[in-house]
Image (cartoon, coloured by chain):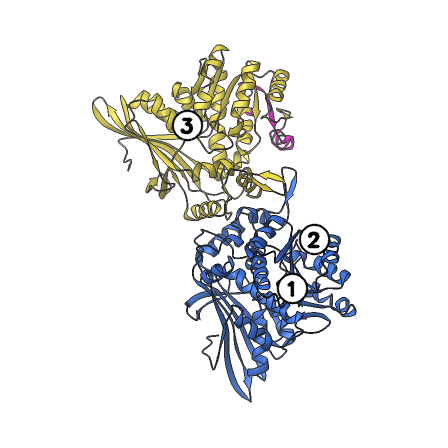
Chain colours: A blue, B yellow
Amino acid sequence: MAKVLIIGAGGVGRVVVQKCASLPEVFSEILLASRTKSKCDVIAEEVGQGRVKTAQLDADNVSETVALINEFKPFMVINVALPYQDLAIMDACLETGVHYLDTANYEPKDEAKFEYKWQWAYQDKFKEKGLMAVLGCGFDPGVTSIFTARAAKHHFDEIQYLDIVDCNAGDHGKAFATNFNPEINIREITQKGKYYEDGKWIETEPHEIHKDLNYPNIGPKRSYLIYHEELESLVKNFPSIKRARFWMTFGEEYLTHLRVIQNIGMARIDPVKFKGVEIVPLEFLKAVLPDPGELGENYSGETSIGCRIRGIKDGEEQTYYIWNNCKHEEAYKETGAQGVSYTTGVPAMIGAKMMIEGKWNGEGVFNVEEFDPDPFLTDLAEFGLPWHEKLNAEIEL
Amino acid sequence: MAKVLIIGAGGVGRVVVQKCASLPEVFSEILLASRTKSKCDVIAEEVGQGRVKTAQLDADNVSETVALINEFKPFMVINVALPYQDLAIMDACLETGVHYLDTANYEPKDEAKFEYKWQWAYQDKFKEKGLMAVLGCGFDPGVTSIFTARAAKHHFDEIQYLDIVDCNAGDHGKAFATNFNPEINIREITQKGKYYEDGKWIETEPHEIHKDLNYPNIGPKRSYLIYHEELESLVKNFPSIKRARFWMTFGEEYLTHLRVIQNIGMARIDPVKFKGVEIVPLEFLKAVLPDPGELGENYSGETSIGCRIRGIKDGEEQTYYIWNNCKHEEAYKETGAQGVSYTTGVPAMIGAKMMIEGKWNGEGVFNVEEFDPDPFLTDLAEFGLPWHEKLNAEIEL
C-alpha cells in the first residue's frame, strides 16, 4: 500500500486516477498535479469521496516538483504529462528519492526524435540511489513489449520476426482530431518510417510502405509502417530478433489532413515570429484542434493492438498472435475517456501496482519487457483490458 | 502631372509603383509607404534613379497617415494595403483634402463580410469636401465592372444576365499558396456563395454550384459560384440586370487544402488565447504560408478574367463576351510580380491616371462602372492588359 503522485490531467491522467482510486488497498493516497489545477479538480470531483487531492504544478520546473514531492512524500511518481517533461520529472525523483514510471519516452522539444538514449543515460544515477525508473508503460510502448516478453517466456526459444500492429477502427465523429496529444501524434506520424532488419535500421519515406491487415472483430484495414519507440528497446532486449516493424492504421481522410497540415506549414516545430512572439506552428495548431481528452462522447468502434510473431520453438517454426481489443464506448462509460486514453492509462496503473507490490523489482532504468510479464498480464485482463493469444496463427506478415 | 502616395508594398504595390514610375509625365513624384519600410526600399531600388521615395507607415493610425500626407502633399492616395485599413485611410484623405483610390472594399476584421455599406457611407463626407474616392479599381472588382460599363455603353440597351468568370490556370509549383493575401483569399472563398436573381440575393453553401466553363486559350476548367463584391454595386448601377453571378476556378487540391484548413480550425477569425496572447488562427496561418508577393518566379500558365453578358440590343437578344488573358511569366519578367498581382496593380495605376488627367471626375464616393469606360480601356490595353471582345459569343451560361 503506497502513496502516488500522478502528474498530468489529460485523458490518460483521468484513466490512471480512476483506476488507482478504485484500488485503495494498493494506492492508499493519490495526489494529481498538472499545470492547470482546474483540470485536476474536475477529475477529483468525478472520483469523489475525497479520494484524490490536487495541486498546481509546472513540471518543467524541477524545484517545484521537488517541493511537491517533499510535501506529499509519495512512494513513486506516475508521469503522464508531456514527453518533453520526462527528464525534469526524473531529476526531481532522483533528488527526492522516489520511484518513477512513465508511458512515453523523452523527446526534445525542437526535434522530432523518438529515442531512448536520453532516459537510458539515467541508468547509473537511478542505480546509485537505489531507485527504479520504468519507461514506457502504456499500451504501445508498454503492453506490446510485455506481450513480446510473454511470447519469449512461454512460446519461443527464439523470436525472429516481430510485427506490432495497431489499429484504431473508431469513429469520433469529428472532421479531424488526434487521439492523443496532437503535437506528439503529428510529430510521430509525419516523420520518416523506420524498421529493423538484420542488425540495421532501414528508413522509409513517410507512409511509403503499407499493407491491408486483418484485425480481429474489425476486418481488413490499411496499415502503414511507421517508426515507434518500443522497437528500439525490443531489438536490444531480444537480440534474436531479425526483423521488427510497427504498423498503424490511418484512414485516407486522416492522411489527407496530415498532408495538408504539413503543406501549409502547420506541422513545423521551429518557431515563427508573430506579433513579436515566438510561436511554434504545431503547438499553436494543438491549441485550435479538439482536445483528445474530450473525444470520448459519441466515440464508437474499437481498437485492436497486438504482436504478430514468428520464430523457433523446439526446433520448429512457430507463429503467434497476441492482442487486445478495446471498445471506445465501454471505455467512456467506465471512465469518461475514449479507448486510446483507456488503453494507455490502465497499463500505467498496473505497472505502478507491480512496483508497489514488489512484483517488479530492481535498481536503475528499465523497459517493461525486462520484467516478468505474467503478473502484469493477469492484472491487465482483470482490470479492463482482456487479451487473447493464438498459436500457429495466420499472421499475414 | 501629380504626386501620388501609394500605401502597401506587397505584390500589387510593386506593380503599381513600377507602372506609375514608368509614366513621369503623369506621376511626377511617388512616395511608397508600408508598415515594413524595408519592403518599400526593395521596390524603390528595383525602380532606381531615385524615382520612388519610401516611408514607414502604420495605416491603421489615422494621425500617422495625416502627418505623412501633410508632409508629402500628394494629389491622391492609391491604397493597396489591407482592406481592413480602407476606412482609416479614407479618414486621413478627408482630413488632409486629397483624393482616394483602392482595389478592394473595406471589411471589418472580426467578420468575413464583403459589403460596400461602410465605404458608401462616406459619400456625403467626400462630396462636402469636394473630393473623389474611387472604390475597387483592381481587376475584379475593377476591370470587370468597367467591362460591364463598356457593354452597357456600346452593345446593350438592357443588360439582363451577367456572369463574371475568373480563371487562374497558372501553376506556381508550391503544394499550397494563395495568389493574394491569404487571409482575405481564404475568408472570401470559404464563405457561403451568393448571387443575384430577380431583385433578390440567393445564398448557396460554399462551392455548392459549379460548372465546367471554357476559357480562351485555356480550355475547360471547373468553375465555382462564389460571392464577389462587384456584384453589389453592378446590380445597383445597372438596374436592368435580372441575374448576376461570379464564377472562379479552383483546382481539386486547392479545395482539399481549404477544406482541411477549415476542419482543423485554422480559418477561424475569432481570437484564440495562446501563451497569454490573443491570436487569430487565420492571421497566424498567413504568417506561415508562402508570401504571395514571392510566388512570381517559376509561375507558369495564365489567367483569364472577363464578363459574359446576355441582354437586349435594338429589340433583339444579344450575347457578348469581353475578357483579358494575362501570362504569369510575362508579368514576372516585366515587374517581378505574378499575374494576379499584375492584373490588380495595372488597373489601379490606370484609375489614378484617369483621375489625374481629369478623365474621371466627380465629388463623392464612386464605383468604377459609374465613369466613362472608354479612356480607361484604351489605356488598359496599352499598358499591359490587352482585352478582347466578341459579340454573339457562345457564352455557355
Is tag 2's residue or tag 1's residue first in the polypeptide sequence?
1
Check the residue under mark 3 and report the chain it is in.
Answer: B
Where residue A199 sits, quadrant-wise, is: bottom right
Mark 3 lies on a secondary structure that is: helix
Range of the magenta residues?
Answer: B21-48
The amino acid type, in three-letter code, at marker 3 is Val
Dot 2 and dot 1 within a common chain: yes
- Provide the residue designation for mark 1: A28
Q: Nearer the viewer, residue A363 or B224?
A: A363
Query: 10 Å neighbourhood of mark 1: few (<14), some, or many (≥20)?
Result: some
User: Considering the image in quadrants, where does the C terminus of chain B appear?
Assistant: top left
> Who is closer to the viewer here, A33 or B216?
A33
Q: Is residue A16 left or right of residue A121?
A: left
Quarter location, residue A93: bottom right
Helix, strand or loop at mark 2: loop
Say what amino acid the circle numbered 2 marks.
Asp
Residue located beneath label 2 in the image:
A60
